[in-house]
Image (spheres, rainbow, N blue to C red):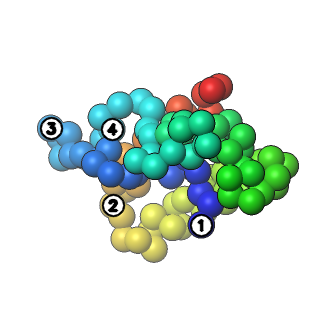
Amino acid sequence: MWQCGLTRVNHAEAFLNDSGRLGRKDSEASHPKAITREGDHRSILEVCVEAAPVFHLTKSEAAQIVDKMDHDLRNNWTEAAYAARLTAGQRESLWESSILNPAIYWPK
């Protein structure tokens, strides 16, 4: 499945901080496997859209997928977190850290 950057929990990036809440080690996530043919690993939406041909998509198709996923996450996050039985604290901790972290919108 092509999901690039919108959810950013991957290999050992998430951790429990001193307060027992889920946190982030850094502000920019990356994937263990390159997203682009040039070897870019960063979870930045602009990188993902530019890598669309690697996934047999046009850049326009990739941008539409990104926009739809962003819209769906923003509009359904609370319901999804509830279905996953997350506490309010867990839900808040994940939002804009592992889920839609503002860093995914940075320019490449």
Give how far apart the Cα atoms at labels 2 and 1 are. Answer: 28 Å
Q: Which residue is mark 3?
A: 18
Q: Nearer the viewer, mark 3 or mark 4?
A: 4
Q: Which residue is mark 2?
A: 87
Relative placement, left or right, of 49 versus 61 is: left
Q: Which mark is residue 24?
A: 4
Mark 1–mark 4 Cα distance, whole angstroms, equals 24 Å
Look at discs 1 and 3 and give the one toward the viewer. 1
Q: Quadrant of the C terminus?
A: top right
Q: CA distance from mark 1 to mark 3?
A: 34 Å
The percent position of residue 93, horizontal first and vertical second, equals: 37, 46
Is 28 rendered above or below residue 77? Answer: above
- Considering depth in this image, is 40 or 4 the residue closer to the camera? 40
Q: Residues within 10 Å of mark 3 (few under 14, many from 20)?
A: few
Which badge, 4 or 2, comes first in the chain's sequence? 4
Using residue 53 as the reference point, say whether residue 17 is left or right of it: left
Q: Earlier in the sequence, mark 2 or mark 1?
A: 1
**Disc 1 residue type?**
Met
Q: Secondary structure at mark 3?
A: loop
Amino acid type, callout 4: Arg
Figure quadrant of residue 26? top left
Tell me how far mark 3 sits from mark 2, CA to CA: 18 Å
- Which dot, 2 or 1, sits closer to the camera? 1
Residue 50 visible to the viewer? yes
From the viewer's perspective, is the residue at label 4 or at label 2 nearer? 4
Please name the residue shown 36% across and 71% down the image.
85
